[in-house]
């Protein structure tokens, strides 16, 4: 690999001691590395499995519409019994900057109620009011062009964003003509329209910014925002292309890590004087803790790992946003539309030139800037039946075997009670419907009750872990998805959209009963267990409620080990999660600094 794709050579950190070792130089890892290395008398080492990538794929917003598999792991889930035993790709960034380099660039937040739920689950200081400070601290906000805002009726409130934070949040100088028609169809629904979705009121249809640098019209991500500007600090080091495969302990005190070079398999150790900080993400943090002897005893033993501490909760509580991807054939779409770049080569060439020379046009837009996050009462008048179905369940009924553990069950009981309240009212969203101006009609479940697991592969502990989504194990999840499908069908039958003569191709009009619909969707691969938000596998909750870390982010029962990534979320918020993860990591850094 060329030097430009690497940073410090691993040999130079061999057997060295740092104050902090951060495992994973993804989104949260780089935020925490930046903030901790502000303390000039503290040394920070970041170890990342991926390399640096500055290719166009990581920069041009419209290219975020295709998966950048070169910068992602190749992982397949375990078969999902509720989805015809199908297996699915699990999307995780494998590059310096992690998910922030390969994601869809949506930069939104959930409602205040989503974050207040974290606090209610036993995490003082993690509610909306305290997180808002960190949401602001992480961003610099640039409003949309005045002319575009006027033409499309875009609303926003800059008071909810920062003015000097590292991550750029802004809007492309472009949208599709048909976005106006789509908005008119949502305006006709009985839903709400918050002026600013990032205000704590994230229920309804609204405009969102993207992680976009308005000066260069390129993606703003964790590496360009948090690492590149400070990489010359002498107390900060990043090694790339190294897979951490064990956290080293002295008794139950974490003392360092062992990592293996992807290039030549050289094994290296480095030591942490103060803390080993896990930032390997929702999939690999639980795997690495298990590899290091912390996790469910049975899982560790099956994989041949010596148990340091039996912790059934590590790898449990797994959540993602399962979603259904319906598709309509539309006539009379305006030009350009999201399909024009791929269907019209002449237009594509001119749009590319326009992007290169003027930084305008269709190449500046990623997945679009309009989203609807709807509460259950907004999605269906039948919401009380679904809420009663949930209330009538015995808590242990629809959970994976590991929930025979009393603490996990107690924690799920507390989560279920909060979710029941959320589904009963309009303070929090139950489902996301991205407002895309072409025939793709996505329904993404925001309040999953099914719980998955991430566990070591007993046949190959260093290989990818066994990722079990358990999508739809809880029938309430299916009921909510069905409500969303019906909402979507009614929506596309609206007169505001009649000009498109929409024809439902997937699942197709012949599918009418719930069973027929689900069957047809599964058969066409149009139900996905993941929205690339795998999280919650090392939940921040009290230990007697199935928590892995406390509100100080320290792992229970051991010393000098903390987690700062998406695995600490107790409940998945109803949003795309990157903006939340920047805020969480900013707060995490302050907590770690405050330990003195
Ligand atoms: C394809 C895709 C699309 C997405 N779209 C959006 C979107 O539009 N909007 C949004 O808000 N969110 C989106 N997300 C989600 C968001 O990017 C992630 O939630 C976020 O990056 C999680 O941050 P993290 O720090 O927890 O993990 P990551 O950013 O994944 O960082 C973890 C890092 O740890 C490294 N690592 C893992 N194991 C090891 C190991 N053993 N040794 C060394 N390093 C290791 C990984 O290589 C990775 O770089 C998307 C994600 C993906 C993958």
Image: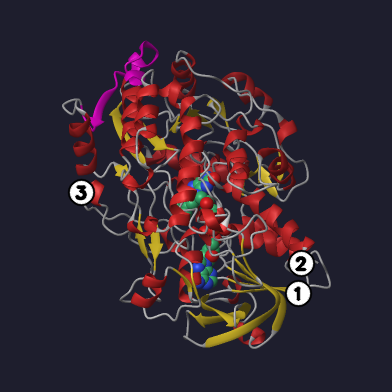
Which quadrant holds the C terminus? bottom right
The region drawn magenta spans 490-508
Which of 329/555 is in front?
A: 555
Q: Which residue is mark 3?
A: 84
| Residue 37: assigned label | 2
Residue displayed at 65% across by 78% down = 8
**1 and 2 marks in contact (CB < 8 Å):** yes
The mark that comes first in sequence, 3 or 1, is 1
Q: Is mark 2 within 8 Å of ligand 1?
A: no
Q: Is residue 502 left or right of residue 257?
A: left
Q: Is mark 3 within 8 Å of ligand 1?
A: no
Q: Tell me if residue 422 comes above or below residue 462 in the rendering.
A: above
Residue 88 on image: x %, y %: 31, 54
| Residue 43: assigned label | 1
Q: Nearer the viewer, mark 2 or mark 3?
A: 3
Residue 575 on image: x %, y %: 52, 39
- Calculate the distance from the C-alpha at mark 3 to the C-alpha at mark 1: 50 Å
The mark that comes first in sequence, 1 or 2, is 2
């Amino acid at each position: 690999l060329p030097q430009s794709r690497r940073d410090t050579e691993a040999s130079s950190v061999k057997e060295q001691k740092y104050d902090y070792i951060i495992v994973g130089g993804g989104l949260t890892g780089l935020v925490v590395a930046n903030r901790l290395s502000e303390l000039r008398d503290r040394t920070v080492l970041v170890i990342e499995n991926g390399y640096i990538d500055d290719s166009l794929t990581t920069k041009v917003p419209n290219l975020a519409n295709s998966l950048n598999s070169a910068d992602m792991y190749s992982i397949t889930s375990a078969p999902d019994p509720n989805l015809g035993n199908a297996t699915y790709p699990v999307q995780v960034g494998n590059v310096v900057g992690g998910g922030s380099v390969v994601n869809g660039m949506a930069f939104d937040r959930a409602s205040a109620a989503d974050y207040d739920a974290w606090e209610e689950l036993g995490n003082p200081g993690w509610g909306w009011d305290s997180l808002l400070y960190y949401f602001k601290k992480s961003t610099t906000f640039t409003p949309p062009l005045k002319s575009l805002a006027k033409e499309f009726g875009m609303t926003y409130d800059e008071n909810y964003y920062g003015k000097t934070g590292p991550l750029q949040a802004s809007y492309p100088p472009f949208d599709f003509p048909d976005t106006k028609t789509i908005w008119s169809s949502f305006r006709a629904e009985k839903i709400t329209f918050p002026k600013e979705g990032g205000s704590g009121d994230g229920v309804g249809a609204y405009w969102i910014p993207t992680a976009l640098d308005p000066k260069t019209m390129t993606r703003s991500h964790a590496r360009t925002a948090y690492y590149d500007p400070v990489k010359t600090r002498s107390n900060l080091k990043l090694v790339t292309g190294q897979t951490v495969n064990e956290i080293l302990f002295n008794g139950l005190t974490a003392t360092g890590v062992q990592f293996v070079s992807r290039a030549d398999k050289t094994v290296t150790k480095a030591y942490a004087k103060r803390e080993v900080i896990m930032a390997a993400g929702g999939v690999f943090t639980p795997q690495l803790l298990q590899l290091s002897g912390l996790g469910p005893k049975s899982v560790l033993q099956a994989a041949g790992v010596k148990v340091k501490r039996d912790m059934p909760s590590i790898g449990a509580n797994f959540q993602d946003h399962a979603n259904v991807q319906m598709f309509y054939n539309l006539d009379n779409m305006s030009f350009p539309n999201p399909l024009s770049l791929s269907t019209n080569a002449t237009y594509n060439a001119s749009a590319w030139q326009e992007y290169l020379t003027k930084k305008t046009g269709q190449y500046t837009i990623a997945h679009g800037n309009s989203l609807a996050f709807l509460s259950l009462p907004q999605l269906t008048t039948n919401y009380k039946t679904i809420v009663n179905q949930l209330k009538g369940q015995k808590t242990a009924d629809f959970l994976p075997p590991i929930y025979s553990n009393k603490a996990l069950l107690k924690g799920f009981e507390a989560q279920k009670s909060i979710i029941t309240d959320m589904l009963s009212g309009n303070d929090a969203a139950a489902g996301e419907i991205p407002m895309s101006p072409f025939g793709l009609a996505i329904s993404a479940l925001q309040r999953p009750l099914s719980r998955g697991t991430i566990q070591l592969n007993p046949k190959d502990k260093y290989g990818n872990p066994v990722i079990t989504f358990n999508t739809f194990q809880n029938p309430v999840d299916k009921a909510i998805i069905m409500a969303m499908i019906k909402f979507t069908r009614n929506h596309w039958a609206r007169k505001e959209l009649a000009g498109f003569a929409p024809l439902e191709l997937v699942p197709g009009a012949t599918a009418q009963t719930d069973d027929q619909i689900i069957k047809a969707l599964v058969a066409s691969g149009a139900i996905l267990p993941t929205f690339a938000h795998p999280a919650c596998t090392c939940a921040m909750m009290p230990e007697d409620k199935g928590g892995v870390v406390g509100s100080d982010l320290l792992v229970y029962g051991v010393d000098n080990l903390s987690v700062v990534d998406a695995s600490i979320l107790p409940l998945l918020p109803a949003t795309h999660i990157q903006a939340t993860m920047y805020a969480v990591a900013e707060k995490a850094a302050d907590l770690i600094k405050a330990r003195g």
